[in-house]
């Protein structure tokens, strides 16, 4: 580094051009290796839930850098000719990623040649010409008026923030000129944001539609016994809690919920107090054959999780509630897959129960025979043990039968 100051301007620029050429070569080589890693799902075998997480956690790339490189790597695997455009500088990483939605086999050469040597803005204009998007409709919006300093002090009272539902009612009394009809296309909504304003409080910003507002008003009315002041924060929080409880009930069979409900200080609600859950309660009917078997002398009483099924009983994928609750507590609702180098996944995304010994080979639904895995590692493990074709066939059958994807594990 200290010798750089001795280089002449021509030597410095020549060296920079040489390094830039090597950088392009290394980029193509990096993308080729990354594409092969992604194709072979090596990241899953190493204990990462996806190739994206591998790049972020193991290679130390930022999320935006990972997105560009992973997108470019997949395009390179799909269109190998892209490598030549990257090597000689006709395309750079950013412009290649901008082209991702318009590249196709039929017009590949034409599109790459038209994009060659262009800047990012020019390539974006090219993409807009190749795949036009609907026009954004005209929007005229009245901005809130700031109180003027010249007004008397009695009038200089800050405008009260209108409630979400009061604003709609207040707006109807204003004399606004009706706007002309616009095309049915709608502008792309900005992503919802959660911004902290203090250690304990956050501001949630999002754009919602009329159906959301109507449903929210119905929920506020239905929860008026729980949230008497109709606070929007409390209503949404109650909905989130009920959704989480429903998800836990489906995953754990209600065992964890019953345990939590028995703790001191846990609020409970009866069907008469809660109209949303009144219709959800159903009477469980015991089949006649089960009742007849249970009434025979010498037949043990208890739940199916306490006694193993008889030899003639048909095996089922249903995991007993007590087993699911115990496994969830043991594994912490995190993926337990450990990669070849000892890295544990620990993902909390789409956690599923996995049979250590495949269910198709007689694996038992016991605490020792069940672990938690994310859906990606659950399927990857099943593919290694049973074969990709068999897993794909089983998923297709289950999707046709239940309308959902659940890999056999």
Image (cartoon, grey):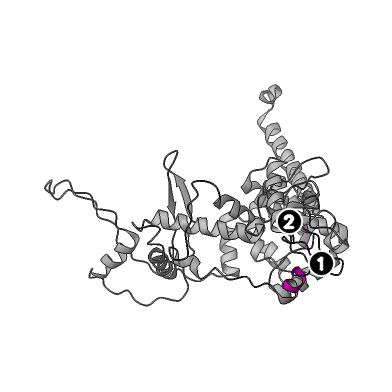
Residue 42 x %, y %: 81, 50
Which residue is found at the position 87% from the left and 61% from the top? 362
Compare residues 404 and 321 and report the one nearer the observer. 321
Q: Earlier in the sequence, mark 2 or mark 1?
A: 1
Q: Is residue 62 left or right of residue 391?
A: left
Mark in front: 2 vs 1: 1
The residue most toward the front is: 297
Residue 255 x %, y %: 64, 55
On screen, residue 247 above or below 42: below
Mark number displayed over residue 315: 1
Which residue is found at the position 74% from the left and 39% from the top? 18
Q: Is residue 40 left or right of residue 52?
A: right
**Which stretch did the figure color magenta?**
291-310
Task: Answer whether residue 406 is magenta in the image.
Answer: no
Q: Which image quadrant is residue 330 in?
A: top right
The reply to whether residue 89 is visible in this rendering is: no
Residue wearing tag 2: 353
Cα distance in 3D space between marks 2 and 1:
17 Å
**Helix, strand or loop at disc 2?**
strand
Q: Residues within 10 Å of mark 2 (few under 14, many from 20)?
A: many
Which residue is found at the position 48% from the left and 46% from the top? 265
Looking at the rendered image, the quarter that the C terminus falls into is: bottom right
On screen, residue 129 above or below 324: below
**Helix, strand or loop at disc 1?**
loop
- Most prominent secondary structure in the magenta stretch? loop
Task: Answer whether residue 308 is magenta in the image.
Answer: yes
Residue 388 x %, y %: 84, 63
């Amino acid at each position: 580094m200290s010798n750089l100051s001795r280089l002449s301007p021509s030597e410095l620029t020549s060296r920079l051009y040489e390094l830039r050429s090597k950088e392009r070569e290394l980029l193509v080589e990096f993308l080729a290796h990354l594409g092969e890693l992604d194709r072979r799902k090596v990241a899953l075998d190493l204990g990462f839930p996806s190739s994206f997480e591998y790049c972020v956690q193991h290679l130390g790339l930022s999320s935006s850098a990972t997105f560009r490189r992973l997108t470019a790597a997949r395009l390179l695997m799909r269109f190998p000719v892209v490598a030549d455009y990257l090597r000689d500088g006709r395309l750079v990483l950013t412009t290649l990623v901008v082209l991702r939605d318009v590249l196709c086999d039929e017009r590949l050469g034409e599109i790459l040649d038209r994009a060659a040597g262009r800047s990012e803005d020019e390539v974006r204009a090219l993409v807009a010409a190749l795949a036009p998007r609907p026009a954004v409709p005209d929007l005229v919006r009245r901005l809130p008026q700031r109180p003027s300093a010249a007004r008397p002090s009695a009038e200089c009272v800050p405008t009260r923030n209108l409630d979400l539902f009061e604003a709609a009612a207040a707006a109807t009394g204003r004399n606004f000129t009706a706007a002309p009809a616009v095309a049915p296309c709608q502008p792309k909504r900005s992503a919802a944001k959660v911004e902290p304003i203090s250690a304990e409080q956050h501001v949630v910003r999002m754009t919602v539609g009329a159906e959301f507002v109507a449903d929210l008003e119905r929920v506020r009315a239905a929860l008026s016994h729980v949230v008497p002041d109709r606070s929007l924060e409390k209503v949404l929080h109650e909905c989130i809690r009920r959704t989480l409880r429903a998800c836990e009930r489906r995953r754990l069979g209600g065992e964890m919920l019953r345990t939590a409900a028995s703790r001191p200080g846990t609020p409970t609600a009866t069907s008469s107090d809660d109209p949303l859950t009144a219709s959800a309660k159903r009477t469980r009917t015991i089949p006649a054959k089960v009742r007849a078997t249970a009434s025979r002398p010498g037949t043990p009483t208890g739940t199916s999780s306490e006694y193993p099924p008889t030899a003639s009983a048909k095996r089922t994928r249903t995991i007993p509630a007590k087993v699911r609750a115990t496994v969830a507590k043991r594994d912490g609702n995190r993926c337990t897959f450990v990669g070849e180098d000892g890295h544990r996944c620990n993902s909390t995304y789409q956690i599923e129960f996995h049979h250590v010994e495949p269910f198709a080979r007689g694996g038992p639904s016991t605490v020792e025979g069940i672990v938690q895995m994310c859906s990606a590692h659950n399927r990857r493990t099943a593919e290694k043990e049973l074969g990709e074709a068999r897993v794909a066939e089983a998923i297709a059958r289950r999707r046709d039968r239940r309308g959902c994807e659940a890999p056999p594990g």
